[in-house]
């Protein structure tokens, strides 16, 4: 089986720590994994945690993984860092290194050498400070979209991707991601919602073995109440739902956004399409960060990540919770198997 590649994340954050802590807690998940990162940073995290059972071994390519014992985690030097950066501090060097690691790891999957990518958190301010080309991307999703489009020889606009948040009780798919709220609402369009539904439907069909049942959230209180509280539902959202149903998708809405997530949690829907970032993320995160997983839909590669950030306030303390990262790894592994 092809390996699963793990990007280190921001070296000043909890990424290296949760990778090692997660694999120490679930050693059965370690075989077939390799970290794209920095060996000095990974050894610092290993020393912080005092781990004895999981050893690190630097490898130059994926072919060398087969020779490693089960208790060894391979690390590919995928970035340039003169030394591990101070924990909990934003720096251009750490942002650049994180971007280099995720880009190299994604390239391995795109080239068919690896089966999936599990990313540890990077810091968006550090990524912005890293300079071009990395500062052009607000986060992982946009960076991976651009890299995949280049790999396919297509324009970025021709490869629509969407963020899906998954917990044991709820799935949400976002129409827009890292935009100011006012801009996200101004850019809301029938075509954008329809594309989101198409991407979600295509991604969930193989996972569920059937057509997914999708709910579309409104954007105004009570989904606009027939135009009393806004017209986005009647003028923008409802036409997208209608066109999706005409195309054979099982879609309903727009639903009142204050109740639709509860209905999905109760099993009425397989996923909720949310109109903007926080509308979809707040319900998932309220149910608990420990099991939330971020999945990028629409890419020609499988990418999962934990549903949290770099947690600079916890970096270097040894107290970071690896549960969400471990859930992301397990979801990637189960998706490959299916």
Image (cartoon, rainbow, N blue to C red):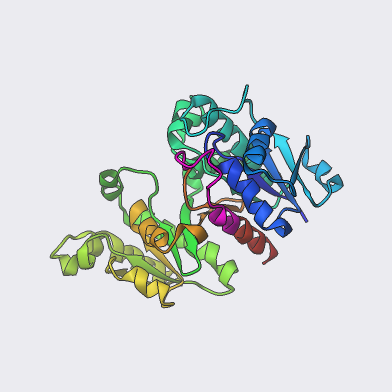
Report the front residue among 296 and 27: 27
Residue furthest to the right in view is: 67
Q: Residue at x 53, y 41 (%)?
A: 317
Residue 110 percent location from the top left of the image: 66, 45
Q: Residue at x 54, y 62 (%)?
A: 203
Q: Residue at x 51, y 61 (%)?
A: 291
Residue furthest to the front in view is: 50
- Quarter residue 29 falls in: bottom right
Residue 289 percent location from the top left of the image: 46, 57
Q: Is residue 323 visible?
A: yes
Report the front residue among 169 and 323: 323
Q: Quadrant of the N terminus?
A: bottom right
300 relative position to 165: left or right:
right
Tell me if residue 289 is in the magenta stretch.
no
Q: Quadrant of the C terminus?
A: bottom right
| Magenta stretch, residue numbers | 310-328
Residue 33 percent location from the top left of the image: 72, 49
Q: Main secondary structure of the magenta part?
A: loop
Residue furthest to the top in view is: 82
Q: Is residue 153 visible?
A: no
From what the image shows, is residue 273 above or below residue 183? below
From what the image shows, is residue 16 above or below residue 251? above
From what the image shows, is residue 175 above or below residue 97? below
């Amino acid at each position: 089986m092809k390996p699963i590649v793990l990007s280190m994340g921001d070296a000043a954050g909890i990424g290296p720590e949760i990778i090692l802590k997660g694999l120490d807690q679930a050693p059965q998940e370690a075989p077939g994994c390799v970290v794209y990162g920095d060996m000095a940073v990974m050894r610092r995290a290993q020393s912080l945690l005092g781990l004895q059972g999981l050893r690190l071994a630097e490898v130059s390519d994926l072919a060398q993984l087969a020779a490693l014992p089960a208790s060894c985690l391979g690390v590919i030097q995928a970035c340039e860092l003169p030394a591990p950066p101070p924990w909990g501090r934003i720096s251009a060097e750490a942002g650049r290194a994180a971007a280099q690691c995720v880009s190299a790891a994604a390239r391995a999957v795109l080239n068919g050498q690896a089966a999936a990518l599990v990313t540890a958190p990077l810091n968006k301010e550090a990524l912005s400070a890293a300079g071009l080309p990395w500062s052009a991307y607000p986060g992982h999703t946009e960076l991976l979209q651009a890299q995949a489009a280049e790999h396919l020889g297509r324009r970025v606009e021709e490869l629509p991707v969407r963020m899906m948040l998954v917990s044991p009780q709820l799935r949400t798919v976002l129409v827009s991601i890292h935009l100011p709220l006012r801009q996200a609402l101004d850019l809301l369009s029938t075509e954008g919602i329809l594309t989101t539904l198409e991407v979600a439907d295509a991604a969930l069909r193989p996972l569920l073995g059937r057509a997914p049942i999708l709910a579309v959230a409104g954007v105004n209180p009570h989904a606009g109440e027939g135009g009393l509280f806004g017209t986005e539902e009647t003028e923008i959202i409802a036409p997208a739902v209608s066109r999706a149903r005409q195309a054979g998708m099982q879609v309903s809405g727009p639903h009142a956004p204050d109740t639709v997530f509860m209905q999905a949690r109760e099993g009425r829907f397989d996923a909720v399409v949310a109109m903007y970032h926080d509308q979809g993320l707040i319900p998932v995160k309220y149910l608990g960060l420990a099991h939330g997983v971020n999945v990028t839909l629409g890419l020609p590669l499988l990418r999962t990540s934990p549903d949290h950030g770099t947690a600079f306030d916890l970096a270097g303390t040894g107290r970071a919770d690896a549960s969400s990262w471990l859930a992301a790894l397990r979801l990637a592994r189960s998706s490959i198997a299916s």
